[in-house]
Amino acid sequence: MSSVVRLAEVLPAGPPPARPVARVGVVVSLNFPDLGEETAALVRRFTRVCLESLHAQGAAFELFDTSAPLADPDSIAGHDGLLLLGGGDVDPSCYGSADLDVPNSYGVDVRADRDALRMIGVAEDAALPVLGICRGSQLVNVHRGGTIVPDIEDHALHRGGPGEPMFLDEKIGIEEGTRLRAILGAEQVVARSGHHQAVDRVGRDLVVAARALDGVVEAIEDPDRWVLGVQWHPEDDDGPADDRRRLFGAFVTACVERRDHQPTTPEKRNRP
């Protein structure tokens, strides 16, 4: 029997900021096909930590649960930033793959993919900062015309094997001169990973911002706009809290900047 994640299980325990510095739209499928209890527990914990991290940075949020069709994906344009969380695999048809029989595939929901991709497009048209995590990073890449590695065959660096915990600590090299390097202030980090897919061909106007020790892409970014995707899970509270604060802090700062300046067209942005 599939497990169910309820909204009340992911909301922060404390109240929202009295005077939010920014309002962020958060996209996640709390439930997706074949959701087992182990993964449901991760969805509950990761989503809650993410939302708590936004509150800690002074930001409010609106949760867009793509488990069901969204009433108005275009409403993201009225927010100050877009945050896309992890979840199931992206449907191969979204990135033009003819092979729909993907090994180890799970949680595929093409309707949820299309809702999320629509929101990314609207957010970019509105010049919102965009942060994608795991599945969210892959969706950002697909929106820009990039592709996904359907299944990483040598997965030892990226997720646990059969009978092992799904998530593990992974060493990741951060590319010099990137926004991500400026945010994290390190050439290498140890992050929490549990993925069997990753960015393959990088989409238009994006660059690789981080790689695993085996060369697998672990982060992408747009050098000229605040668009960033990380394959690992900074919202895993078993991982480094300082890196999580730095990443969420930089994202919220970008959201505040966007709100204060309200650009009507995409503009060049300096890295933090």
Image (cartoon, helix red, strand yellow):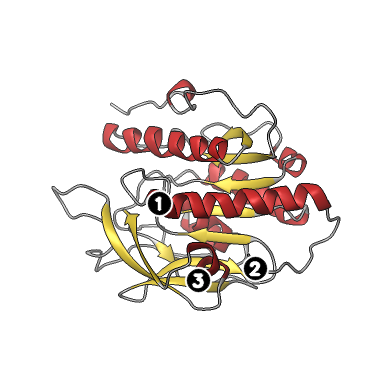
- Tell which circle, 1 or 3, labels the residue nearer the N-terminal end: 3
Let me know if residue 5 appears in the view: yes
Q: Which mark is residue 271?
A: 2
* In the image, farthest residue toward the right: 264
- Residue bearing the label numbered 1: 233
Q: Nearer the viewer, residue 233 or 93?
A: 233
**Left of 38 or right of it: where is 93?**
right
Residue 27: x and y, percent? 57, 41
Say which amino acid is labelled 2. Answer: Arg
Say which amino acid is labelled 3. Answer: Ala
* Image quadrant occupied by the C terminus: bottom right
- Tell which circle, 2 or 1, labels the residue nearer the N-terminal end: 1
Q: Nearer the viewer, mark 2 or mark 1?
A: 2
Using the numbered discs, state the Cα–Cα distance from disc 2 to disc 1 in whole angstroms: 22 Å
Identify the image quadrant of residue 211: bottom left
Residue 89: x and y, percent? 42, 51
The reply to whether dot 2 and dot 3 touch (C-beta < 8 Å) is: no
- Tell which circle, 2 or 3, labels the residue nearer the N-terminal end: 3
Q: Nearer the viewer, mark 2 or mark 3?
A: 2
Say which amino acid is labelled 1. Answer: His
- Residue bearing the label numbered 3: 209
Q: Which secondary structure lies at badge 2?
A: loop
Using the numbered discs, state the Cα–Cα distance from disc 1 to disc 3 in whole angstroms: 15 Å
Residue 88 vertical position relative to residue 15 in the rendered view, above or below: below
Residue 265: x and y, percent? 84, 60
Residue drawn at (43%, 69%) of the image: 186
Residue 161 vertical position relative to residue 269 in the rendered view, above or below: above
Using the numbered discs, state the Cα–Cα distance from disc 2 to disc 3 in whole angstroms: 13 Å
Q: Which secondary structure lies at badge 1?
A: loop
Q: Which mark is residue 198?
A: none
